[in-house]
Image (cartoon, rainbow, N blue to C red):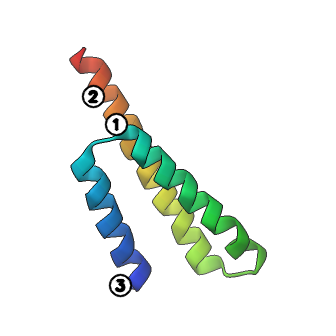
Amino acid sequence: MKIQDLLFILVFLFVFWHRSPRLATIIGLLCLWLAIPLFKFWIFFTAEHLTWYAAAFFAYAIALLIINELKS
């Protein structure tokens, strides 16, 4: 497990604790924004992981939005 995976887990737990779909979406967009230069410089391993992390944050945000909609 690399340091980027540990950082992802820590950030995801922070977002999970706050239960904010907006925060999850912002961090997902930040992951994609950070991945773009890495793809440009051919650093594919880290860039690919960042896109997977972004997908996880987006999926969590969607799940929170669905749960909030069902509650109301």
Q: Is residue 6 above or below residue 9?
A: below
Task: Give left or right: position of 22 versus 9.
Answer: right
Closer to the camera in the image, 45 or 9: 9
* Residue furthest to the right: 40
Callout 2, which amino acid? Ile
Disc 2: which residue:
67
- Disc 1 marks a residue whose amino acid type is Ala
* Residue 24: % across, % down: 41, 48
Callouts 3 and 2 close, C-beta under 8 Å = no
Disc 2 element: helix
- CB under 8 Å between callouts 3 and 1? no
Give residue 49's position: percent from left, percent from top: 52, 70
**Which circle's residue, 3 or 2, is located before the other in the chain?**
3
Q: Which quarter of the figure has residue 67?
A: top left
Residue bearing the label numbered 3: 1
What residue sits right under mark 1 in the picture?
63
Q: Please tell me whether mark 1 sits on a helix, a strand or a loop.
A: helix
Distance from label 3 to label 1 (Cα)? 26 Å
Residue 66 point in image, percent of width and height: 34, 27
Q: Local crowd at mark 3 within 10 Å, few (<14), some, or many (≥20)? A: few
Residue 61 is at least partly visible in this image: yes
8 is higher (above) or lower (below) than 46: above
- Residue beneath the point at 54% across and 61% down: 31
Residue at x-position 32% and y-position 35%? 64
Disc 3 element: loop
The kind of residue on which mark 3 rests is Met
**How far apart in space, not on screen, are marks 3 and 2 (Cα)?**
31 Å
Residues packed near mark 1 inside 10 Å, few (<14), some (14 to 19) or many (20 plus)? few
Mark 1 and mark 2 residues within 8 Å of each other at the beta carbon? yes
